[in-house]
Image: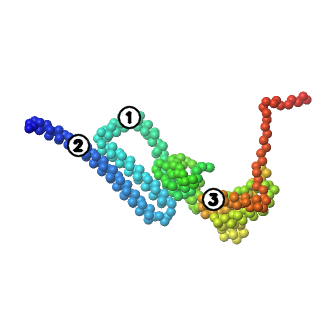
Amino acid sequence: MPTTAETVQETGTITTFLRVLGMDLLILLKIIAIIAAAWLVERIMRLILKRGYARRKAKGRDEFTQYRFLRNAVRTVVVVAAFFAVIYSIPSLRSFAFTLFAGAGLLVAILGFAAQKAFSDIISGIFIVAFKPFRVGDVIQVGQQGLFGTVEDINLRHTTILTFENRRVVIPNSIIGEERIVNSSIREEATCQFVEIPVAIDADIDAVKRIMQEEAKAHPSQFDKRSPEERAAGEPEVAVRVIDIKDGSLLIRAYVWAPDPVTARVMRYELNERILKRFKEEHIGVALPIRHLVQHNPFIPPAIDDHG
């Protein structure tokens, strides 16, 4: 049988173990409570935003853009707050974090410098949502001759654009905020598409204009954008003009309206094919560039004029 001293020693060991285990369990319960609270807060905020958007859905893309941005922002803030709360709830990590940020000034400076880009993206994202150069669902072109697609999402750090090749391009908000944006949907989606064909300089201009007008008016995506005043004045439904003369050719442009930019682009491709087929049927020549190449041989010295 164990003696009284041995019993007391075993009881003390068990008590110490339970005390340590109880402290670890308490910390674990705190972490679980923090994660559960963060998940609950995120869900409640998301539900509030979703209901608010549902009541204002009829107003269009502005509210939807704000909803998506705020939803992403709330999720990010809740995750960051939960992360720091978990660190603060663990004594060893809390002491380490205080020591690190209080004593390592150089590290803090490096982290602050590295975070400049992130803060710049966040501020640019807020400006994009506030001033609305584009919205979720808008068809935009980024840069002079750059990316062309539909805005799929805007969050704190970046904007996601879905291209017509079904690829998603992620652009930081600070970069897209400095680019030139062509927005085809900010007011209305109706698009005037330029259909340009170069023809020979001696081609029958009247026949060229007639063919381009007929093919454009016959296309199912084309519609009449003339105002009542323009109709009364006799303006053509599809205007066709000679816009340039150079390199032995005439550049003829038809101004054709389509309901949206995507349809307009497809319509232009189809009209190019239809018009070229009509030109071939009516023997109208399409202009080809003429280039004169002059080659100099550097190994043959120029002729010397004896009378010079």
Q: Residues within 10 Å of mark 3 (few under 14, many from 20)?
A: few
Give the amino acid at mark 1: Ala
Looking at the image, tell me whether mark 1 or mark 2 is earlier in sequence order: 2
Q: Secondary structure at mark 2?
A: helix
**Which quarter shows the C terminus?**
top right
What number is the disc on residue 104?
Answer: 1
Give the amino acid at mark 3: Val
- Residue 17 location, quadrant: top left
Closer to us: mark 1 or mark 2?
2
Q: CA distance from mark 1 to mark 3?
A: 59 Å
Q: Residues within 10 Å of mark 1 (few under 14, many from 20)?
A: few
- Residue 266 location, quadrant: bottom right
Q: Please report contact status of discs 1 and 3: CB closer than 8 Å, yes or no.
A: no
Q: Position of residue 60 (x, y in %)?
A: 50, 63
Q: Position of residue 261 (x, y in %)?
A: 60, 59
Q: Secondary structure at mark 1?
A: loop
Q: Residues within 10 Å of mark 2 (few under 14, many from 20)?
A: few
Query: Which residue is found at the position 38% from the left and 49% from the top?
Result: 79
**Residue that badge 2 annotates:** 21
Of the pair 77 and 252, the residue shown nearer to us: 252
**Which quarter shows the N terminus?**
top left
Closer to us: mark 1 or mark 3?
3
Q: How many marks?
A: 3
Q: CA distance from mark 1 to mark 2?
A: 33 Å
**Residue that badge 3 annotates:** 266
Q: Position of residue 44 (x, y in %)?
A: 36, 58
